[in-house]
Amino acid sequence: MGWCSFKDHQILDLAKKHPFDVFITADKNLPYQQNLTDKTLKVIILNSRSTRPDDLVPLMEKISEMILFLSMGSSVFINDVGEIELVG
């Protein structure tokens, strides 16, 4: 899609114009840098020890399950053991 050079706020704005429901990021500072309360996306912030695939792949199964139960506009952290914490 050519979005790799965009900043988080640009990606969140672009996502409104495309058929995305979920924004998944490893940027733990996102809730402190962006106003997530007015977003229509589900935002999932990976609170993992690293962004290596070996550390993230186990979270993908948990994330795929929890996406179904998150309401639009909600933002959550998910840690290495799959614990979920609401943002805000």
Image (cartoon, grey):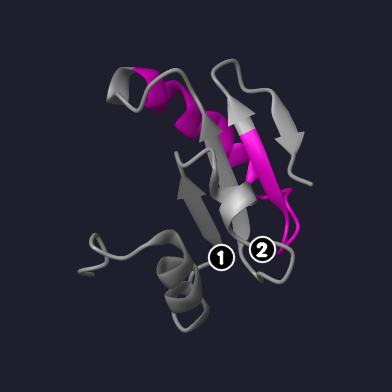
Q: Quadrant of the N terminus?
A: bottom left
Nearest the viewer among 17 and 6 is 6
Which label number is shown at residue 35?
2
Distance CA(mark 1)–CA(mark 2) = 17 Å
How many residues crowd around disc 2 within 10 Å: few (fewer than 14), some, or many (20 or more)?
Answer: few
Residue at point 41%, 67% (across, down): 11
Q: Is residue 13 above or below residue 80?
A: below
The answer to whether residue 58 is magenta is yes
Residue where numbered disc 1 is placed = 21
Nearest the viewer among 24 and 7 is 7
Residue at point 38%, 21% (across, down): 50
Of helix, strand and loop, which one carries label 1? Answer: loop
> Percent position (x, y) of residue 25?
46, 46
Q: Which segment did they paint magenta? A: 55-77
Residue at point 74%, 33% (across, down): 85
Sequence-earlier tag: 1 or 2: 1
The type of residue carrying mark 1 is: Asp
Identify the residue at the far left of this view: 2
Identify the residue at the far front of this view: 33
Q: Is residue 15 above or below residue 82?
A: below
Nearest the viewer among 5 and 60 is 5
Residue at point 71%, 63% (across, down): 73
> Percent position (x, y) of residue 79?
59, 23
How many residues crowd around disc 1 within 10 Å: few (fewer than 14), some, or many (20 or more)?
Answer: some
Residue 27 relative to residue 83: left or right: left
The type of residue carrying mark 2 is: Asn
Residue 26 relative to residue 33: left or right: left
